[in-house]
Amino acid sequence: MILVKFRKSPLGNLLTSDLLDFDVGNLFNDKLWQKKMYEPALNIKEKKDEFEIELAAPGFDKKDFEVTIADGCLNIMAKKSEKREAKDENHTRKEFSYNSFEKSLKLPENIVDEKIKAKYENGILKFSIAKKEETKNQK
């Protein structure tokens, strides 16, 4: 542990010894400082004829998604930004938000790329991925 000389803050007792009880050398490696990204919940189900994938992404619109298939991976990317402005006689209030995520799933070799269907409804992005005929009868 590295000792840091404590000087009384003009903010009073807002700084407590608990806040200073960490290794300053690891300040930027500490989990408190790591950026948290939105990670949507994901369900994958294997059925006899197909795979079903459900991705929880509430708050997005269909136009916010970009879905591609490349090198045997299903790549899902979504971006949404929103700006709001309210003006009054005495002030102007501006707000904005930005949400995004990227998800890549390695697809099994026993699927038909041309028979991938996607649907976005009630905040859930659903994929239906058909299996090849010869693998449907195998367990």
Image (cartoon, grey):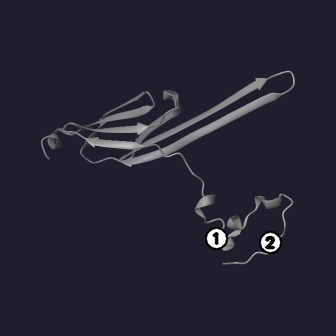
Residue 22 visible within the image: yes
The label shown at residue 109 is: none
| Residue 29: percent from left, percent from top | 61, 66
Measured as percent of width and height from the top left, residue 61 is found at 51, 28
Label 1 with label 2: CB-CB less than 8 Å: no
Residue highlighted by disc 1: 26
Q: Is residue 107 above or below residue 31?
A: above
What secondary structure is found at the residue carrying circle 1? Answer: helix
Residue bearing the label numbered 2: 6
Q: Residue at x 45, y 41 (%)?
A: 76
Which image quadrant for residue 138?
top left
The amino acid at mark 1 is Asn
Q: CA distance from mark 1 to mark 2?
A: 19 Å
- Left or right: 28 in relation to 111: right
Residue at (64, 31) in percent of width and height: 82
Q: Which quadrant is the N terminus positioned in? A: bottom right
For badge 2, the amino acid type reads: Phe
Of the pair 47 and 12, the residue shown nearer to us: 12
